[in-house]
Amino acid sequence: MEICTLEQYYFNNLMTERLQKLIEMNEKKESDFLLFAIAKEYEADAQVEKALDCYAQLVVKYPNYVGTYYHYASLLQEQDKKTEASSIIERGIEICTIQGDRHAASELAFLLETEED
């Protein structure tokens, strides 16, 4: 049995409270930013499937929220889902190109290159 330190306890409670508040706010008025923040909270709490689900919702509901693609693809790569990651990266590069966001597109291109190595 792992002993939880007081610091870990407070960190976990803070994360749970923050996640709960984000979910409540998103239920009142959904937004791309809130859904992204929820995904990041799940990811930080090692709830990978929930994070992936949020990212998947983001690319469907808010395809122009370019920050999603990098984080989603990175998490997919970590889970050894390389084909899915490549698809997300390629779609993200398309969206970034349409929006003229060269910086985000170059980050995604680099992520694709590192995946192929």
Image: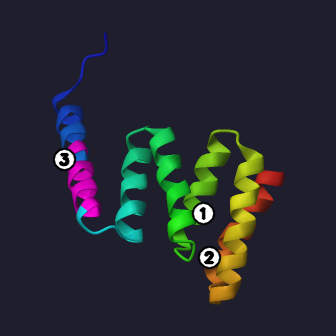
Front position in the image: 109 or 89: 89
- In the image, residue 76 sits, relative to residue 55, either above or below, namely above
| Residue at 42 percent of width and 62 percent of height | 36
Q: Which residue corresponds to mark 1?
A: 70
The answer to whether residue 17 is left or right of residue 23 is left
- In the image, residue 96 sits, relative to residue 56, either above or below, namely below
| Residue at 63 percent of width and 47 percent of height | 76
The answer to whether residue 91 is left or right of residue 4 is right
Q: Earlier in the sequence, mark 3 or mark 2?
A: 3
| Residue at 47 percent of width and 53 percent of height | 54
The answer to whether residue 112 is left or right of residue 45 is right
Q: Which residue corresponds to mark 3?
A: 17
The answer to whether residue 68 is left or right of residue 19 is right
Q: Secondary structure at mark 2?
A: helix
Residue 68 seen in render: no
Front position in the image: 91 or 103: 91
Q: Are marks 2 and 1 in contact (CB under 8 Å)?
A: yes
Residue 33 seen in render: yes
Q: CA distance from mark 3 to mark 2?
A: 31 Å
Start and end of the magenta stretch?
Answer: 16-27
Q: Secondary structure at mark 3?
A: helix
Q: Which residue corresponds to mark 2?
A: 104
